[in-house]
Image (spheres, helix red, strand yellow):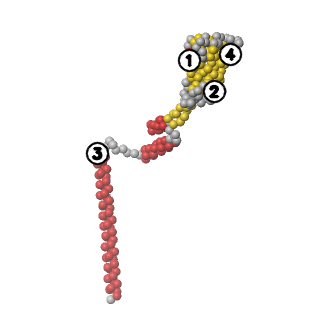
Amino acid sequence: MKMKIFGLFVCMLLMTTAVITAAGLMTKKDISDSQLILDESRNIKTDKIIQDNPVNMEIFSKEDVIREYDFMNTKTEKTIRDEPDDPQKQEIKIGYYSIPATAFLPYDNDASWYNSGCVVYGFGAVFAPVYLPHEAEVEMMEYHWSDTDPYMDCGVMLCRSSFDIHYVEMADAWTSGSSGDGTSSDNTIDHPKIDNSLYTYYLYSAVGYDVWMYGITIRYNYEVRVNTIDSVQSDESEVYNK
């Protein structure tokens, strides 16, 4: 009796195993069929897109992708490296201001003096205004003259006045001997910074009948602000166009 029951149990176990195996095979087959249907559907959609847009579709190789990646990295690194902390920078420029003889007026209107525009001479003191840019810094004053008097030298002074009768001397230069035409200069400037909000500036000189003045030249420097954003944008365009 026990042997019959054991044999029956073995038969039932074999039948159950066969059923489970068949079910697994059917499930795998169903999954494979479903995946195949899905892949075919995707291929049909892809073919449809290519047919509808034959011009806009591009095929990128591995080399194309690497080249594009390197280009974008190069552009980003250059942009970050060239980005200025301050969009503006300062540069020093040199300027010149000339005062002709015709700008000078005599201290005494009754003085005997002569002014032909390019030269002034006579006897007595003469004055001329000076208009330099605000915040400029005077570097040198040059005095252009003619001296044929062996006994008298004449000079010119650059002065600063604080809107009253008081003034200070900033620079001075003098004629020398009786050699004729010459130029003398002074580059040791006192109070060289121009402040038009607090002071006025002028030239004070003396002339003689044999000591003539042709004019004065003042050299100065000043700061200008330069925008650096334009140069950065130019660098970016250069990288992009490569």
Can residue 78 be seen in this snapshot?
no
Judging depth in this view, the residue of 2 and 127 nearest the camera is 127
Identify residue type, mark 3. Asp
- Choose the circle earlier in sequence order: 4 or 3: 3
Task: Kindly report which numbered mark, 4 or 2, lies closer to the viewer in this rendering.
Answer: 2
Name the residue located 62 percent from the left edge and 16 percent from the top edge.
125
Label 4 near label 1: C-beta < 8 Å? no
Name the residue located 58 percent from the left edge and 27 percent from the top edge.
164
Judging depth in this view, the residue of 113 and 193 nearest the camera is 113
> Which dot marks residue 103?
1
* Dot 1 crowding, Cα within 10 Å, few <14, some 14–19, many 20+: some
> Which dot marks residue 32?
none
- Choose the circle earlier in sequence order: 3 or 1: 3
Rendered location of residue 207, percent (x, y)? 63, 14
How far apart are labels 1 and 4 at the CA level? 21 Å
Identify residue type, mark 2. Val
Can residue 131 be seen in this snapshot?
yes
Residue 106, picture quadrant: top right
- Choose the circle earlier in sequence order: 1 or 2: 1
- Choose the circle earlier in sequence order: 1 or 4: 1
Residue designated by label 3: 52
Asked whether, in this view, residue 228 is left or right of residue 165, the answer is left
Identify residue type, mark 1. Ala
Does dot 1 land on a helix, a strand or a loop?
helix
- Choose the circle earlier in sequence order: 2 or 3: 3
* Dot 4 crowding, Cα within 10 Å, few <14, some 14–19, many 20+: some
Residue designated by label 2: 168
Identify residue type, mark 4. Asp
